[in-house]
């Protein structure tokens, strides 16, 4: 059974999952994490979600407001054991719904070129590539995306 729980970045399960994400990103990006690591801090986020599969923490994600009408989706992650079950899509869908409920109209996000599964997820979910936004401008390892959350304004 799947259960998605809304929480904050202070939630212990969310923090454990983001620690696992950081370990995986370090394996993929190595020394580049000295740049990316500080940008990934999420302890202060108010809007995070954790997804459980049969009571076991399987994945997470969060968003941060970046303007009056937009949020940045961050820290989407699914543990290796649970991949291929569309859990990342469920996390993303929940985050988008929550942002919509709060009145946000646009979601942006950044992912890395060494995460092809994340790129496929965002493209399949209707995100369009956009020019890299700060602080990712000129960072060749980054790809940025955007999606309208509200159809009717």
Image (cartoon, rainbow, N blue to C red):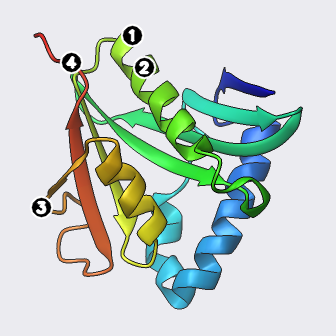
Q: Residues within 10 Å of mark 1 (few under 14, many from 20)?
A: few
In space, the residues marked 1 and 2 are separated at their CA atoms by 6 Å
Q: SS for tag 1?
A: helix
Q: Residues within 10 Å of mark 2 (few under 14, many from 20)?
A: some
Quickly name the residue at label 2.
Answer: 97
Q: Residues within 10 Å of mark 3 (few under 14, many from 20)?
A: few
Quickly name the residue at label 3.
Answer: 131
* Contact between labelled residues 2 and 1, with CB atoms less than 8 Å apart: yes
How far from the left and from the top, in percent, is residue 24? 66, 72
Seen in the picture, residue 11 relative to 120 is either above or below; the reply is: above
Residue closest to the far bottom: 31
Mark 3 or mark 4, which is nearer to you? 4
Mark 2 vs 4, N-terminal side: 2
Quickly name the residue at label 4.
Answer: 150
Q: Residue at x 73, y 63 (%)?
A: 80
Quickly name the residue at label 1.
Answer: 101
How far from the left and from the top, in percent, is residue 129? 18, 57
């Amino acid at each position: 059974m799947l259960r998605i729980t809304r929480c904050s970045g202070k939630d212990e399960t969310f923090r454990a999952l983001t620690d696992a994400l950081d370990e995986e990103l370090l394996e993929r990006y190595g020394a580049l994490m000295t740049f990316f690591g500080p940008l990934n801090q999420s302890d202060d986020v108010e809007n995070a979600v954790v997804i459980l599969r049969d009571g076991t923490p399987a994945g997470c994600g969060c968003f941060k407001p970046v303007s009056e009408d937009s949020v940045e989706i961050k820290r989407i992650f699914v543990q290796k054991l649970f991949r291929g079950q569309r859990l990342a899509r469920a996390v993303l869908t929940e985050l988008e719904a929550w942002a919509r409920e709060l009145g946000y109209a646009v979601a942006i996000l950044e992912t890395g070129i060494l995460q092809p599964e994340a790129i496929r997820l965002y493209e399949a979910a209707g995100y369009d590539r956009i020019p890299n936004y700060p602080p990712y401008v000129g960072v060749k390892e980054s790809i940025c995306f955007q999606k309208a959350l509200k159809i009717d304004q």
